Image (cartoon, rainbow, N blue to C red):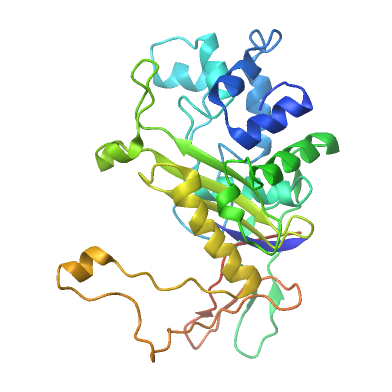
Amino acid sequence: MSFVVVAYAVASTPALIFSIIASPNLLVLTLPSLEGFKHAEFSALDQWVRKYGFGETTGIDLMGESIGIVPSPAWKAKHSKEPWYPGETVIAGIGQGYWKVTLLQLARGVAALADNGWRNRLHVVRERRDGYNAPWKPLPQPPAVRISDNADHLRVVAEGMMQTMQPGGTGAAVARGAPYVIAGKTGTAQNTSRKGNISVNPHALPLSLRHQAWFIAYAPVDDPKIAVAVMVEHGGFGASTAGPIARKIMDAWLLGKMPEPEVNPDVIAAGGHSTALPANAQAPTTTANAPQDGATATGKANNGNASAPTTQAQAPVASR
């Protein structure tokens, strides 16, 4: 399978699906606290999260990737004088604590869920040629890696992500009116703790203290063509900030529907100019096209001896 990529616990199936749909912190925190998990070796959790590609680079053909942080007793011993507490295994199980991930890692992880459990290396360039008269040759990619051999586990996660986008789910507003079925998950990386039992409205905080807004998705569910991971720095909530951006990306890729130009009322009120184009103007075009007849958006690198190499840019692709 080939498609474009833009960049919990032990429980009964109904409870796990509900924890994905509604993101209730109390339930999710309770699940990994069940007897048997409290005394489990962290190595089991570490092993599973690394299957999704966390704690390593994705291998994409771009520079500057970070590996993030997969917290563990060994990692903490290297970076802190404090011991690893049992409660840290619990919060690490829901992605909190010392965790740090990149957008590309999340995009590859959700792409693996879309691809029936196969994790592929992300790549921007598909083919190259050594000279203008030489034939194009595909760049070899490493074999895909399984994130899980249990089809039931993958099915439950997919079901939870689909229901997240249905009425009652945290991502329902994002999927409203879409002519295709979306599997998605909202998320919030919190910068500020609660004050006792009182929740803090992130939009009322200074910008530097507001939460990071996350959203991941793939679509269409029955034949995935795109996997998306969106993060809005200090955006507040994933459903209201990152989710709508992901929807516009998916509409553009799957339907050819480009986002409407946005007018900033603050700029207009200050006597400035809107960034929206005049009614008779045309938006700039690029050389990258959406895939036709199920093809993927892939680029080519031309390494000529007499001329500078040329490239065609496009979104990263996961394929095997």
Q: Is residue 159 left or right of residue 129?
A: right
Q: Quadrant of the C terminus?
A: bottom right
The reply to whether residue 140 is in sight is yes
213 above or below 264? above
Give the number of callouts: 0
The correct choice, above or below, for 253 with respect to 146 in the image is: below
User: Which residue occupies the foreground of this view, 241 or 212?
Assistant: 241
Q: Nearer the viewer, residue 115 or 122?
A: 115
> Residue 176: x percent and y percent?
60, 56
Depicted 9 relative to depicted 218: above or below: above
Image quadrant where one finds the N terminus: bottom right
Residue 39 as seen in the image, left or right of residue 55: right
Residue 119 percent across, percent down from the top left: 71, 48
Between 150 and 245, the one lying in front of the other is 245
Q: Position of residue 196 (x, y in %)?
A: 36, 15
Name which quarter of the figure residue 192 lies in. Answer: top left
Q: Residue at x 77, y 22 (%)?
A: 12
* Closest to the observer, 62 or 254: 254
Q: Residue at x 56, y 53 (%)?
A: 174
Instruction: Judge whether 171 appears above or below 73 on screen.
Output: below
Give the left or right position of residue 14, taking residue 80 as reference: right
Judged from this view, the residue extending furthest toward the left is: 271
Q: Could you tell me if residue 228 is visible in this image?
A: no
Instruction: Using the rendered view, name the quadrant where residue 121 is placed.
Output: bottom right
Horizontal and vertical percent for residue 3?
Answer: 70, 63
